[in-house]
Amino acid sequence: MAAGDSQRAWFPEMMSELKDTWSHQMTWEECADFCHKMTLFRKSIWKEGNIKPARTWCKNCQEYHDSRPPDISIRSMLFALKKLNVIDHDELTKLDRSWKKYRKASNLDAYGKPSCSYSGAQKPASL
């Protein structure tokens, strides 16, 4: 296992897949599906490479625990595209703003899934 693999969000194989798959015509839903696919791909890379998760100290129970990396977010995908020089800084800014606007209007989380918040909606009555 290479140093830092347990902290890595995008492995070279994933970056290659991103470069091959990315299109300016992709919808945000397609981007969300792609990010989910990349999250599963990263899990398989971890399993095949026997990569152990980073360990964190819990000050409440005074023990170390394995941490789970977050899923690949759409914003992470945008920054990876910039790193690959597929998009430039101006396009990154434009896409990031577009994603934030779409995300807010559609009440989605960072991964393109429906948000659990009740912002703007009536909360269910308590039992």
Image (cartoon, grey):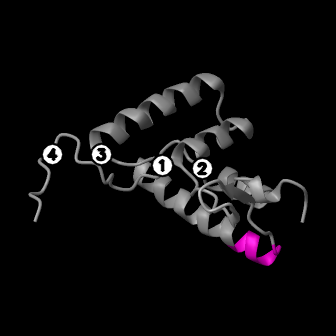
Q: Name the residue under label 4.
A: 121
Q: How crowded is mark 3: few (under 14 residues within 10 Å), some or many (20 or more)?
A: some
Nearer to me, 5 or 92: 5
Q: Which amino acid does label 4 sit on?
A: Ala
Labels 3 and 2 touching (C-beta < 8 A): no
Labels 1 and 2 touching (C-beta < 8 A): yes
Q: Quadrant of residue 66 in the image? A: bottom right
Q: Quadrant of residue 75 in the image? A: top right
Mark 3 and mark 4: Cα distance apart in space = 11 Å
Labels 1 and 4 touching (C-beta < 8 A): no
Question: Residue visible at 74% across and 65% down?
Answer: 53
**Going from the N terminus, do you reach mark 3 or mark 1 first?**
1
Where is residue 92? Give x, y as percent.
58, 30
Q: Mark 3 points at which residue?
A: 107
| 36 relative to 121, above or below | below
Q: What element carries label 1?
A: loop
Where is residue 49? Give x, y as percent.
83, 73
Q: What element carries label 4?
A: loop
Q: Mark 2 points at which residue?
A: 22
Q: Residues within 10 Å of mark 1 (few under 14, many from 20)?
A: few
Q: Which of marks 4 and 2 is in front?
A: 4
**Going from the N terminus, do you reach mark 3 or mark 4 first?**
3
Question: On the rendered image, what quadrant is the N terminus found in?
Answer: bottom right
Magenta: main secondary structure: helix
Mark 4 and mark 2: Cα distance apart in space = 35 Å
Q: Mark 1 points at which residue?
A: 26
Question: Residue visible at 64% across and 33% down?
Answer: 87
What stretch of residues is rendered in magenta?
Answer: 44-50
